[in-house]
Amino acid sequence: MGKVAVGATVVCTAAVCAVAVLVVRRRMQSSGKWGRVLAILKAFEEDCATPISKLRQVADAMTVEMHAGLASDGGSKLKMLISYVDNLPSGDEKGLFYALDLGGTNFRVMRVLLGGKQERVVKQEFEEVSIPPHLMTGGSDELFNFIAEALAKFVATECEDFHLPEGRQRELGFTFSFPVKQTSLSSGSLIKWTKGFSIEEAVGQDVVGALNKAMERVGLDMRIAALVNDTVGTLAGGRYYNQDVVAAVILGTGTNAAYVERATAIPKWHGPLPNSGEMVINMEWGNFRSSHLPLTEFDHSLDFESLNPGEQILEKIISGMYLGEILRRVLLKMAEDAAFFGDTVPSKLRIPFIIRTPHMSAMHNDTSPDLKIVGSKIKDILEVPTTSLKMRKVVISLCNIIATRGARLSAAGIYGILKKLGRDTTKDEEMQKSVIAMDGGLFEHYTQFSECMESSLKELLGDEASGSIEVTHSNDGSGIGAALLAASHSLYLEDS
């Protein structure tokens, strides 16, 4: 093979030579293209690097911003909103309580019967209601009337098991997952609508007042005991089952954190100090930014082209809304600059947000020898019929880089909260247990992400301190958490 017999005639016509040269050139081009793919991959990996030293810098910056946000409104990128929740559930709560969870195109109504420490949640029922699209852009009264009517119908189905003692008014926890400037536990004015809602007259309006008026109009006698953010609800739900819960983090489509602060550590608080000596703070940590965050060209372009440039920077690199989009942007660069998918760039790859984080999670989780799931996802989403194994391995590497950065930065944020609370080290050999309640689809369903986050938090804390820190899943905080907060702030606590 490769040897020419002596005396044989070597035929090398122009056509044959041209083909041979073309083959060699294609091989060289292909190796050149592959070199460019690997160069893009390597540069991206370096730009996303989160060594422990960088995570410590991010955590320190988070703690500094927390202090600044507690000192004055507008003093920090972190809003550090006072929730007016000064009593978290203890587990002793008894009785019937309602919850209304409004956070998107559907809302949920729920009732919960609480039986104290022994029985906990005796029974619960809920119903989901779709909001007709015209009500999302109509008038304020029309929207709140629709919600109040659905709530009244739900109350009318209350059976004997859910017994309300005579003389008691029904009480409701209201989860309202839109930006609100809260003025007390049961009042807050809408700052702006998101998620497809656009009712101009409701902006600046007290949402509790609007719901109260609508309930009066439909003849429903119910007291709104608490207006809460979904992260605060998650904290309440976590604390109900475990008194060591000190903070809650949501890692889903978006991200946020809330924690229990000493009331004396909030300089901007001007009212009388709460009897509990504590106050839940809604951090709105998605808006955190710092020069220490490892941002890439892809993050900068995503931010620049977003609806809110310069805002929610942490959210744009760690939450489920954006991880798949970052993957798409890197693949697009590889396709354009290094012909990753061949001579033409797949047209689908140019569509923003076509790769969603659940797609990315499914590919990242592919353990088959030929990475079959990666191949089928690329085929289904981008309409690229065939991919080689080495291409699929590059996709897996990108998923790993993006998820690892997000998970490790989430851990750094949690570590920053623990530092602010003085719970990042063991003091006097006394193990002070601290539990972080987690919720959100990203945390719950993207295994590599949540495992990496937990191991990174351990790495930051060190072996000794990490023994006293626990991360736990607190499901459905935005629903049951609101009912629990209505219970812990009930007018009838003394009677329970």
Image (tube, rainbow, N blue to C red):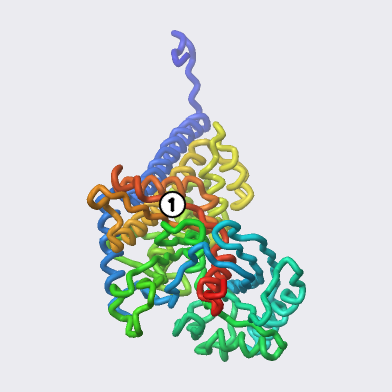
Answer with left or right where residue 422 lies relative to residue 199.
left
The amino acid marked with disc number 1 is: Val
Q: Nearer the viewer, residue 15 or 178?
A: 178
Q: Nearer the viewer, residue 342 or 348?
A: 348
From this view, report whether residue 213 is shown above or below residue 440: below
Image x and y of residue 125, in percent: 69, 65
Image x and y of residue 492, in percent: 56, 77
Image x and y of residue 151, in percent: 69, 77
Q: Nearer the viewer, residue 106 or 209?
A: 209
Name, please, the residue furthest toward the left: 428
Residue wearing tag 1 = 471
Taking the spot 44% from the left edge, 50% from the top edge, the residue there is: 403
Taking the spot 64% from the left edge, 70% from the top edge, the residue there is: 96
Q: Quadrant of residue 356?
A: bottom right
Q: Nearer the viewer, residue 492 or 296?
A: 492
Answer with left or right where residue 140 lies relative to residue 439.
right
